[in-house]
Amino acid sequence: DAKTTQPTSMDCAEGRAANLPCNHSTISGNEYVYWYRQIHSQGPQYIIHGLKNNETNEMASLIITEDRKSSTLILPHATLRDTAVYYCIVRQFLKTDKLIFGTGTRLQVFP
Amino acid sequence: DTAVSQTPKYLVTQMGNDKSIKCEQNLGHDTMYWYKQDSKKFLKIMFSYNNKELIINETVPNRFSPKSPDKAHLNLHINSLELGDSAVYFCASSQGLREIEGAFFGQGTRLTVV
């Protein structure tokens, strides 16, 4: 499975957009990009996923570059409750399905 | 209504004991998982079951034995507990073995072995 690289930590002011980058330069054509987050002391929460097109849902937007070697998760109006560790995961469906979590990005939203 | 529920939430026990953690999902999903999050916060898959059949066993010591009595339940039994087993254990479920949509996680069971 492809590895992902994320910054260790980021800060964002409340109400501003939080842009979380992820590099996955070894991603292959059949692998999806998934984002999860883990708020302190809770279980991971699914946010969004995509293959090659940009995606948007009620939580966030996912922008995937044309070469698919990197992506950005966008929280359009960050709130204090968005403070969490955000994991970017590349997931392949040809092999046995499992999520491989990296170290993630710790996002701190401040007032 | 809790989608994936685990019990207990906290478990403190002595080395050498045997303990179980229960997990139930009310989402009608076919696939369930156990993940372990250690003190350094790394999340690693341990097992997955699809329709009560073991699919993934990630080189976990055989002291750990998952049991799936039905599709809605996946329990984790741990024999002869060791200090290194201290961690947070998360149960999760997803719709199918190759499900595109995300998995749902429980709130975790914090196991402390003393």
Image (cartoon, coloured by chain):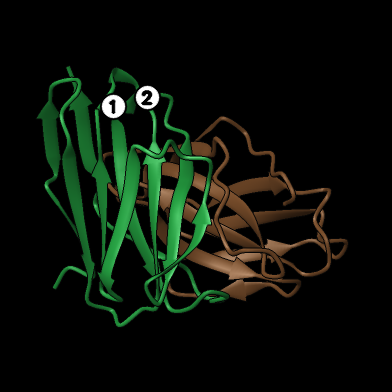
Residue type beneath disc 1: Ser
The tag earlier along the polypeptide, 1 or 2, is 2
Q: Is residue A21 above or below residue A36?
A: above
Front: mark 1 or 2: 1
Colour in which chain A is shown? brown
Q: Position of residue A95 (x, y in %)?
A: 69, 64
Same chain under badges 1 and 2? The reply is yes
Q: Pointer 2 indicates a residue of which chain? A: B
Tell me which amino acid carries mark 2: Ser
Nearer to the camera, A85 or B47: B47
The quadrant holding residue B54 is bottom left
Residue at 47% over, 69% down: B102
Q: Residues within 10 Å of mark 1 (few under 14, many from 20)?
A: many
Tell me whether circle 1 and circle 2 mark residues in contact (CB < 8 Å). yes
Query: What is the quadrant of residue B70 in the picture?
Result: bottom left
Percent across and percent down for residue A20 are 59, 47
Q: Secondary structure at mark 1?
A: loop
**Residue B86, numbered label:** 1
Mark 2 = which residue? Answer: B39
**A38 horizontally vs B23: left or right:** right
Residue visible at 17% across and 68% down?
Answer: B2
Q: How many marks?
A: 2
- Identify the chain drawn in green: B
Residue found at the far bottom of this picture? B28
Q: Is residue A71 visible?
A: yes
Picture residue at 34% right of the left edge, 21% below the top: B84
Q: Tag on residue B11? A: none
Q: Secondary structure at mark 2?
A: loop
**Can the viewer see residue A39?**
no
Image location (x, y in percent) of residue B65: 33, 48
Q: Name the quadrant of the C terminus of chain A.
A: top left
Identified at 58% across, 48% down, the residue is: A100
